[in-house]
Amino acid sequence: MTPFIAIERVSKAFGSDAGPVPVIDDVSLTIAEGEFVVFLGPSGCGKTTLMRMVGGLDHPSEGLIRLAGEPVTGPSRAKGMVFQSYSSFPWLTVLKNIRFGLKYRDDVSEAEADRISRHYLELVGLTAYAEFYVNRVSGGMRQRVAIARTLAANPQVLLMDEPFGALDAQTRERLQVQLLDIRRAERKTVIFVTHDVDEAIFLADRIVVFSARPARIIRDIKVAERVPGERTLDSREGRPFLDLRREILAIIREEAQYNEAALIAAG
Amino acid sequence: MTPFIAIERVSKAFGSDAGPVPVIDDVSLTIAEGEFVVFLGPSGCGKTTLMRMVGGLDHPSEGLIRLAGEPVTGPSRAKGMVFQSYSSFPWLTVLKNIRFGLKYRDDVSEAEADRISRHYLELVGLTAYAEFYVNRVSGGMRQRVAIARTLAANPQVLLMDEPFGALDAQTRERLQVQLLDIRRAERKTVIFVTHDVDEAIFLADRIVVFSARPARIIRDIKVAERVPGERTLDSREGRPFLDLRREILAIIREEAQYNEAALIAAG
Amino acid sequence: MTESKRRPKSGSATESQWRTLFRFRGKARSDVELTIGVASFVAILLAWTAVAELRWIAPQFLPSPLIVLQAIYRLFTGQNFAADIGISIFRVWVAFIVSALMAIPIGILMSSYRIVGAVTEPVIDFIRYLPVPALVPLTLIWLGIGEMSKITLLWLGTFFQLVLLIADDARRVPKEYVETGRTLGANDRELMRDILLPAMLPSMVDNLRITLGWCWTYLIIAEIVAASSGIGFVIWSAKRYVKTPEVFAGILAIGIIGLVTDQLIRWLHRKAFRYLGS
Amino acid sequence: MTESKRRPKSGSATESQWRTLFRFRGKARSDVELTIGVASFVAILLAWTAVAELRWIAPQFLPSPLIVLQAIYRLFTGQNFAADIGISIFRVWVAFIVSALMAIPIGILMSSYRIVGAVTEPVIDFIRYLPVPALVPLTLIWLGIGEMSKITLLWLGTFFQLVLLIADDARRVPKEYVETGRTLGANDRELMRDILLPAMLPSMVDNLRITLGWCWTYLIIAEIVAASSGIGFVIWSAKRYVKTPEVFAGILAIGIIGLVTDQLIRWLHRKAFRYLGS
Amino acid sequence: AGPDHLDCAYPFWVGFGPVHLANELGYFKEEGITVNEIIDDDISNAYAAMERGDIDCYLRSVGEYQGRPRTPEMQGIIIGTIDESNGGDGVVADGSIKSVCDLKGKTVATEPNLPATLILQMAMKSKCNLTFDSLNRVDIASQDAGAIFADPSVSAVGAYEPVLTQAVQAHKDRGAYVIVSSREYPHLITDTIIARTDNLRSQPEKYVKFLRAIYRAIDYIGKEPEKAIAIMAAQFKLSPEEFKETIANINYIGLDQSVELMGTDGKPGKLHDIFTEIMQLNIENGAADIKLEADKQIDNGIITQVWKSRAQ
Ligand SMILES: Nc1ncnc2c1ncn2[C@@H]1O[C@H](COP(=O)(O)OP(=O)(O)OP(=O)(O)O)[C@@H](O)[C@H]1O
Ligand SMILES: Nc1ncnc2c1ncn2[C@@H]1O[C@H](COP(=O)(O)OP(=O)(O)OP(=O)(O)O)[C@@H](O)[C@H]1O
Ligand SMILES: NCCS(=O)(=O)O
Ligand SMILES: [Mg+2]
Ligand SMILES: [Mg+2]
């Protein structure tokens, strides 16, 4: 497979009063079309920053990111994003928020846009709340609005930053399954950030584990090889799943300890 | 024990163009001083709303809430709250955000306030970020700021709405343990919302499971009786823990199915 | 969050309507607010009557409310004051609408593209400080002595202030909204139309309300320029012959128009932006 | 998000400095902005020179820049224009500071307690529409012809507008901040001081900037009232005799003061509120 | 404007009522011209409008006519007189001031280039040989004079009627009285009719018609004062009573008297001397800086024709 997304020796530093603060340190990564990659890493390590750069919302201080061979220069509909702080438009209702992205697709008629937005509304279980303004619904519901809106816009690449964080176990499981269905049916490439190792293994073809800030890749795990076969909710109980789970938790714990030590030395 | 918090036949409905929408339906609950109660329930069922009413930020449409015998009429320092959308003050640095609540404690000198805020800053692992403005730090870090700020203000009751949602597994575990330590040392009463059943069992003395909207209590589980002994990270692997976990997941799944059916019937 | 009215309606219900007035960010019922508003005007009226009747200020300079009322009656019956009011409202609204129609797109563009901002901001910063009365002759030279110059003078006083307020509003739209729009495929034009504009709308309406009032303050300047109608002209001509009651009648008319307009826009604001929660 | 300057500095670096001007919400370097700002003034100056030199407008009404420059020179050397500028700046700033010191607490209280809002809003809505020139005699009666009446006229034109802008700013502070403050034990006074005030500060400074300019527009009204000094007086007495070059000199002086003040406040805003991100 | 139309601007002053009266009585129409009246107080607006060709005539006092920026080349030339102030302009002083000479060193508030200023200057010059240098003179707008006089630091204010009367009445406690007025200086404050020079040269006939109609209106005032006042008062938004009180202090100048003032057939009249005298005052007080010559600024050709046509 040709690399669909290519992150080429990317570094990023933010300016501050005390000089530049490095956040991403020389990261290279290629992602194939249709691949589902999960980013794991300690809080504050730079996952969101890296994802924003793939989405064209931030720019690398050094290095280059390519999408389908072309350098990424800015955001576009091709790169759909679910933000960590799920943002929705307070002046629109739940349904209109979901429908928002369809405005800019000239391949979609009005009637079809209605159908599609209702479809995703239902998918995230908000049919009864279609006409509520978004700050009249709960936190978890707002997050679902953001997910449905991004899916409805039908991007090539889905960038999802802790999208299921505020959802109850049931809704979460349902959406996980749906997400796998969608990306299989429509061959979407997905980058997904989560702190939930179970979720990561369940969803991912590959898990990329980052170090603490500045983010470097400390492990790149081919999940598809390690947990073969179809993903069902039951596969979570299987041996390969549980083994991989233990292994990843160990990696994380080790990095955290290393990091803790550094922190104590520094602070 | 006398009930420290008493929720007495509380109902709540929000006005909307289509008439009042019931959110909480005749809920009664008493919580003893020093108890740690976890609210579990489907997204959008009314957990946040109930918690806000305990905190005095919303008012019941019917019924009454008492704290230490007195009716709750408004918010106060006694009822510390970590909001679901962790809000911090953008015009203050991380450290100053944490220190903010200490301003209003006349039992605390300037020097002591410094010490306390530095203590909680360290507790949540943000020492290196003390002087960053809050919108220069990551989502997980912002959530930790909110937690540290609430703890530093030393309220009698801690109301925590999905506080650990955006944290990586390591940080989360560490903060869980710390939270148990704090409430044991200072005999705090805690109400805690989470969607993570493991977290719920690990932390709770009692788990209250709510129905879908309008929220009614469908189960009130005395965790302390079911999983006796000290809570350590290892106790999560024990039989009583896993049994209880399975039981709760079953309750939730059942409620969700019931709810799904109702939704399909309605929608 | 509008609470439903299911609470028991006891004697204390109305009492708490008054108490909420004193609560931080409490909401009051609109009839209660109206009562208070009327009361404060009555208080001012009484104070005015007292000052005038006790002759603390000579009646040539401060006539009593009764005398002003008589002047209003005279103006309406004898001088067709209604027509003056009509023409003034017409002039102000034309100038204001033209200002708004120009300021909204330009302000949004100023905040969106530094090139527009860099070119226009310094010039606007310069112009908006200028005293409009000093620009009257130039306006006359360009536009002659007809309606056009009067409306232009009102516009001069309004547009340059409004456009900066609008640019500030647009600048404050959180970048999260813009980024969301971008990733959904909105182009620049769509960002401005579908995101900046609705996101800034509530504060923009506030600022339009404020500048509409500013536009009115220029009325007297505009209507002493080769005019023979309008409230400004009535005030000016009465002032010339020291007919103070008529001056006050004109002032009062403007104030009442202002009061009514402002209250109306505030009410519309509450209705239109209920999604902001309350 | 200020990006570090680690990017390779190639020939295209400066080129992209120009391109960012045309990018939606792009940031431009301040030297680039300055160049453009100066360029747009030069363009206006050229247009002005052309119109004046080609006699499209008679020189009595639009003198050429050179003639205005000569008038400025005359004013400075012959009439102590520097003192006029000084006294005008003094009057405006006194009136503005008094307005701000009153408007900030009152505006915050208006937005915080409905009782304050309900009592004051209608009255302010009424007063702020009134034409200040028509209120001159009353001001004179109360305050005489000294500094006090001039400053009061400037204040009249500024305070009632500012207080509403401030109240709107305070009203827009998200309730999340207030609720957070409450649960941390802040009382009403502390909420206003420690939360409302800093949260609204950036937009308040924008609005103070706008109203400072507004205050200057009243200078000419204030300084034709029994004045014998100040830029407004210079303009007005020159205008009486159609000494247009001097009128333009005065106008220019006010415009330049405005430009410099606005740019300074904008710059301070950027420095002070860097936490807003960029 | 065309050969049978005039746009004519005048300030909000009762002395100019005959223009409106002629219009309302249809005298202009009878002459075959239409006249559009424009009310504007600010003389610099009149300059602008005349330079632009928006107006063909305006009405002002001689003193104001001479003020800056008038140069000999500028549009505008005096072709007739319409009224003169007879007590309608003056200065109100504090009771402690016994004569204008006592004003020396005191604060006096007047509006520059308005009649009251000239009257005061004239009085000081003729009675005590003082100039404005001996005063602390502050600029005001005449309408505010009554209010300004409330400030005890002000010893005298200049204004026109009815502001003068108002100031006297409102400040009886300080013994306010009119210390000097136009009544003492006949013809000093004479209002004139000024034509746009270009237009006058190209279409003199219409100005003849214009003047003839105006003087007919002035005759009508003498014959039917009640009716005339009712018509004119409406234009100034005054009641007939208020109008009558105000015109008690002015005289309308009929054709005969106008001819006497203007002279005929290029021979100078009284106005030429007055013009020269005022010119001197204006140069002294700074209202003018170019010495205009009376016979270049006053053109009695039109009024001569009117006079002759009536004599026939
Ligand atoms: N605008 C900014 N200015 C300066 N530093 C920033 C800025 N934005 C982010 N950072 C820093 O970059 C680092 C990485 O942030 P990022 O949001 O990418 O973390 P993350 O891995 O997504 O963390 P989390 O899991 O908590 O969301 C943080 O340490 C943060 O302080
Ligand atoms: N201001 C409001 N107006 C109308 N309805 C509201 C308002 N606030 C909340 N609701 C409704 O109340 C219900 C409960 O909301 P709440 O935020 O308490 O849910 P929750 O249990 O906390 O959900 P989550 O787990 O997603 O945070 C939701 O269905 C929501 O639509
Ligand atoms: N801002 C109004 C100023 S003025 O029109 O009264 O000069
Ligand atoms: Mg993140
Ligand atoms: Mg919630």
Image (tube, coloured by chain):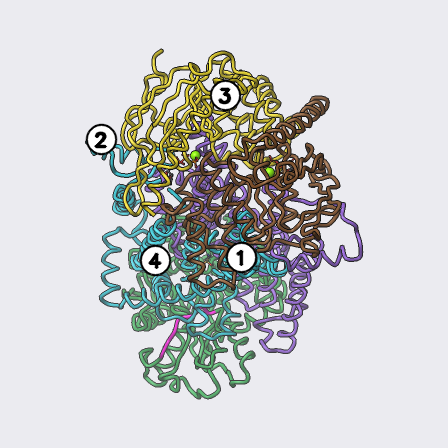
Chain colours: A yellow, B brown, C purple, D cyan, E green
The image position of residue E41, as x and y in percent, is: 46, 60
Up-down: is B119 above or below A205?
Answer: below
Q: Nearer the viewer, mark 4 or mark 1?
A: 1
- Secondary structure at badge 3 equals helix
Magenta stretch: includes residue C101: no
To which residue does mark 4 refer?
A: D254
Callout 2–callout 1 Cβ contact below 8 Å: no
How far apart in space, not on screen, are marks 2 and 1 (Cα)? 50 Å
Where is ligand 5, by quadrant?
top right
Residue type, label 1: Leu
The image position of residue E286, as x and y in percent, is: 31, 69
To which residue does mark 2 refer?
A: D12
To which residue does mark 1 refer?
A: D191
How far apart in space, not on screen, are marks 3 and 2 (Cα)? 46 Å
Name the chain letter of the residue that bears numbered label 4.
D
The reply to whether label 1 and label 3 mark residues of one chain is no
Magenta extent: E136-142
Name the chain letter of the residue that bears numbered label 1.
D
Residue type, label 3: Phe
Name the chain letter of the residue that bears numbered label 2.
D
Up-down: is C123 above or below C254?
Answer: above
- Secondary structure at badge 4 equals helix
